[in-house]
Image (spheres, grey):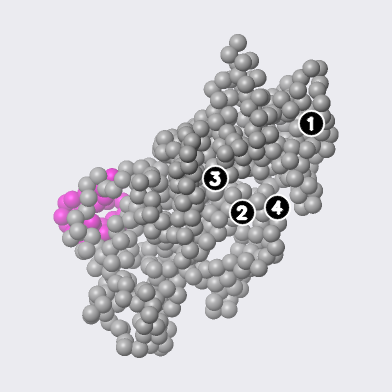
Amino acid sequence: MYCIHCGAQVSDTANFCLKCGKPTALKVDSRNNYFSKQKTVNQLQMLTRSSAMKVFGEPGYYCIGCGSYIDRAAADRALRNTCPACGVPIIGKYTRPQTFIGAIAKNVAGANNPNRNVNPETLIYNYYSSLYYQRNNYPYEEVAADVEKTGKYLVEVGYQKARASFKNFRTYIFFDLLIPEENGSFQEIDALVIFGSMVYVIEAKNRSGVFNMKSLSEDYWDFEAYNGEKCKIYNPLLQNNEHIAALQHYLSERLDFEPFFFNFVSLAGNGTVNWNIPVDPLDELKLGCWRVTNNANMEKTFTDDFGVFLQKMMEPGYDDGFPDYDDKYAQKIIDALDEVLNEPAEERDKKIAAMADSKVDKGQRPYRYYYGEINRSVPMLFRTNGVHSQVIYAYTGRWNSAYNVVGLSENGEPVLLDEKVRAEWTVINSEDELRNAFLCVKNGTGTHKETGTENGTEKGTEDGLMFFHGCNDLETLNARYKNLCKTFHPDGASGDEETFKMMQDAYESLKVKYLL
């Protein structure tokens, strides 16, 4: 790495520069505050120009505008001085527009390209001012030579553009989190965006080409690069499912509420998806609330989502009953993640290197699905891959942590942790069975569903008790109730009056029990 004060090259582990004697790094606050001691403009300019010169000396690099690979020799042969994907000028010996080497009059990107006069030096300067740089301290020339690091940084570019439209609302972004798992492994999350109790778990892919698939949730996607090369890659949404499950488990032990997780895949490098595929209910079931966007549309994706949340907050009668948009929930999540957010980069890199050489299971684990009925009445879905377990309760379509509700027997079969409640489980062996089971759970209609009353107890209230299965005290009961309110309240986007009343009646019944 390079000294932020004088630009001299120093060891990656050095705390002080041998040339100027000043500290080589500055402390970063986990809540996305800027350096506790800001770099001066002169220091940033020095870093920028040093990196621009180094990148110019390389035969190619990944574009800071879109992530596409820039081959200098190919660009010279085509008399091109801009990135063919986004139009940002190619980094030259001098990056100011007036003196830019290779600024040939024949600009094949077109005279009306909005990026043709963008100064790459400004974009490099923005990199050194970014949160991604604060987190990792990678010099820009290192990022420009690494396809994965470029893809991660471009997530922040899209996020910051969207954030500029919502300056009055607090949102947070973090990079390169290692979430520990019970089997001794960990899941590496590329980026995390937090807004209230909503968590965008982002997998960054930097590939120039088209992803093709028969369905969004199939195990492998076909990828065809723009140069004609073809290969198969593991479904990044399924890969991100592992990240979400690990994070959900980690937070479930540290929070008194359940965050809402978005399964988000960003495609840099001018990548795109062939959306000419049929809609399948299994996509929602297997992938949760998903987003897939390329680099050019990332700003719009965030802006659209944040706009929906903002509109909800401005509606008459909005109150703290819906925790989605309240910053205090974001602060709780950040506090719960404090240990992983502040893990030193050198420690993180050591873990990644050690795990690469180990035989510990690191992911791509297929799920087994089970359909369960509680007391021959209330349906639920359960899935496990031996490391992570999740459950969908009746009347919902959302995976929740199963760690305090369902365990695994010695032979790997599901078992309710509350021994007073009886459950019947059926293993699901086909996608048709899974679709039908999912429909039963969402509608609350089990195969043994009965109506009327039993022993003088309203059947609806009895069914509603399943919403609070695993809540053994008033504190966890109240936390589950608040979390369910945002899903079922009639004023919510996915609200349902009948289900909300059933859940509320069950809550009142249990609350009296715990208060006595």
Q: Earlier in the sequence, mark 4 or mark 2?
A: 2
Q: CB atoms at circles 4 and 2 under 8 Å apart?
A: no
User: In the displayed structure, would residue 239 be above or below residue 214?
Assistant: above
Above or below residue 238? Residue 372 is: above
| Sequence-first disc among 4 and 1 | 4
Residue 248 falls within the magenta-colored stretch = no
Mark 4 highlights which residue?
282
Q: Does the magenta stretch include residue 17?
A: yes
Element under label 2? helix
Outermost front residue: 316
* Foreground of the two, 233 or 156: 156
Q: What is the magenta range?
A: 1-28
Image quadrant containing the C terminus: top right
**Mark sitting earlier along the chain (3/4):** 3
Q: What element carries label 4?
A: helix
Q: Which amino acid does label 2 sit on?
A: Leu
Residue placed under numbered mark 3 in the picture: 261
| Residue 466 in view here | yes
Marker disc for residue 377: 1
Identified at 49% across, 44% down, the residue is: 312
Spatial separation of the CA atoms under disc 1 and disc 3: 29 Å
